[in-house]
Amino acid sequence: MEDVELFIIKPKFVLVAKVLPLIILSAPIWFTIIYSILLGGLTGIEVGLSILLFCVVVYSLVLWIDKKSYEAITYKVYKDRIECYTGIFNKKCECVKIMDIKEIGFKQNLFQKMYNLGTVYFAMDTNNANILTMMNFKNVLDPVSICREIENCKKDFQNNYKN
């Protein structure tokens, strides 16, 4: 029998959430430029624009790396396990058995609700009696239906395991 994934989940990269901090953090530089224009000095404008240009270039590089790291993440759900593939240069795969999952849930902040995104989390038992480990699927579309689907996989696995 072939091991086929039931569904594949890819996280969503939302540029607006990443650019907003740049706009907020660049406010002092804009004030410096406007203040220099009002005083009639050209040096302040040149310095302010140079700093602003440097910040935009560095932040663009950070955004590009962040986008590539989002593109490298894949979550695969099978009948008996969930696999999480991450990494741009160093590939990594984490595997969780469905029967080890004790709790499934999701979290959404206000911004994620606007885009129907969320973080789906799984709490699993470890070998230590009172410690749960967590696995998060960050910025996935429609986290409510993903939680339901994984709950159904868990119920199906438990029903098949008992029979």
Image (cartoon, grey):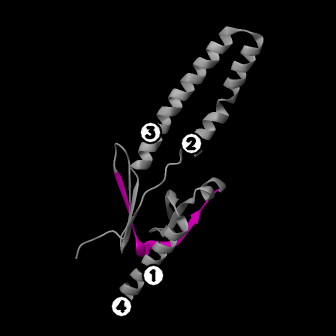
Q: Could you tell me the amino acid type at mark 2?
A: Lys
Residue 52's x, y, as percent? 60, 23
Q: CA distance from mark 4 to mark 1?
A: 12 Å
Q: CA distance from mark 4 to mark 3?
A: 48 Å
Look at the image and say whether residue 148 sits in the magenta stretch.
Answer: no
Q: CA distance from mark 1 to mark 3?
A: 38 Å
Earlier sequence position, callout 4 versus callout 3: 3
Earlier sequence position, callout 1 versus callout 3: 3
Q: CA distance from mark 1 to mark 2?
A: 38 Å
Tag in front: 4 or 1: 1
Q: Could you tell me the amino acid type at mark 3?
A: Ile
Tag in front: 1 or 2: 2
Earlier sequence position, callout 1 versus callout 2: 2
Q: Nearer the viewer, residue 114 or 104?
A: 114
Residue 67's x, y, as percent? 45, 43
Tag in front: 4 or 3: 3
Q: Residue at x 51, y 67 (%)?
A: 123
Check if mark 1's residue and mark 2's residue have beta carbons within 8 Å. no
Q: Which residue is mark 3?
A: 65
| Label 1: few (<14), some (14–19) or many (≥20) C-alpha neighbours in 10 Å | some
Q: Which residue is mark 2?
A: 18
Look at the image and say whether residue 98 sits in the magenta stretch.
Answer: yes
Residues in magenta, as a range: 92-109
Q: Residue at x 36, y 71 (%)?
A: 6
